[in-house]
Image (tube, rainbow, N blue to C red):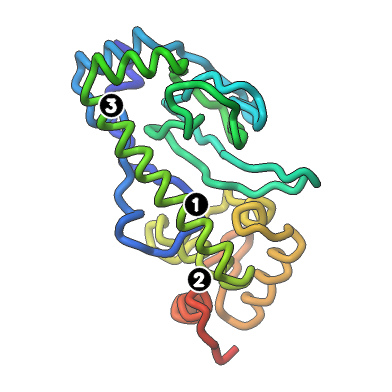
Amino acid sequence: MSRRFSGSSAAYRAMALYETIPDLQGEPYILDVLNPSEKSILLRAGKLITFKSGDTLFRQGDPHGGIFIILSGHVRTYYAAPNGREITLAKWPAGHFVGGPDILGGGQHIWSGEALEPVEVLHLPGQVARDLTLQCPAFALALVHALAHKGRCYSALLQMLATRSAIERLAQVLLNLAERSVDGRSLPLHVSHEELAMLIGSTRQWVTASISRFCKQGVLGREGKQVTILLPVVLKRLGMGGETDL
């Protein structure tokens, strides 16, 4: 059996635009709920594929070729508008799958998936995924939980885009990112302003200017490349559409 299936993925979390809602905190990891025998069945049925950073796993508009269970690395799913502008739907870590919502095949991909670093996946064509759901009830249940989680994430994304201003979305996503750090205040160094912009539906220049303004106002602190939230209460009020004293 592959060593890739031996560990838990629960230490990783998806990066998406959402409010801090309890229902979005528990993430379903497909491999974690399968026993060794079920994992062996899954491994034999699928095909291991590696992608380099920047490679496309699947492209918006292409015929649907199945789903990809992420074994290592992170994959960004995104939608590209006719004018070329992109919005990031989420960044998915190991344990999640990408390539939905047509998990059983058919139709076309309605968004794209891109490797953000070297990625290894287990590819399951639609018919293979269909057969596995009949053969392995635990796998079928894991897919249902994973789809429900993705539905909540994308619903939260739609609600945030429709009801919050860009500055409110930026405040919320900064809080979400800081939640993942050891101290609950430090922003990850690997998340660029360009990534933040595509996540909240804005531009890199606007994100850079807004973060600089937050630093001048004392809401954020900057030491070298490390940015830390100094006044989380201000970002929380702003993220919820409230007024601040700044």
Asked if residue 7 can be seen in this view, the reply is yes
Vertically, is 95 above or below 131? below
Query: Measured from the top left, where is residue 74 in percent x and y?
Result: 51, 36
- Compute the Cα span from label 2 to label 3: 41 Å
Q: Secondary structure at mark 1?
A: loop
Q: Earlier in the sequence, mark 2 or mark 3?
A: 3
Vertically, is 22 above or below 213? above
- Which is nearer the eye, 35 or 161? 161
- Which is nearer the eye, 171 or 149? 149
Mark number displayed over residue 16: 1
Mark number displayed over residue 229: 2
Asked if residue 230 can be seen in this view, the reply is no
The amino acid type found where label 2 is placed reads: Ile
The amino acid type found where label 3 is placed reads: Ala
Mark number displayed over residue 140: 3
The residue positioned 58% from the left and 66% from the top of the image is 170
Vertically, is 98 above or below 186? above
- Compute the Cα span from label 3 to label 1: 24 Å
Q: Tag 1: Cα neighbours inside 10 Å, few (<14), some, or many (≥20)?
A: many
Q: Tag 2: Cα neighbours inside 10 Å, few (<14), some, or many (≥20)?
A: many
Q: Secondary structure at mark 3?
A: helix
Nearer to us: label 1 or label 2 = 1
- Compute the Cα span from label 1 to label 2: 19 Å
Mark number displayed over residue 144: none
Left or right: 242, with 167 as reference point: left
The residue positioned 45% from the left and 37% from the top of the image is 93
- Residue at the farthest front position: 107
Left or right: 112, with 8 as reference point: right
Vertically, is 43 above or below 72? above
Snapshot quadrant of residue 215: bottom right
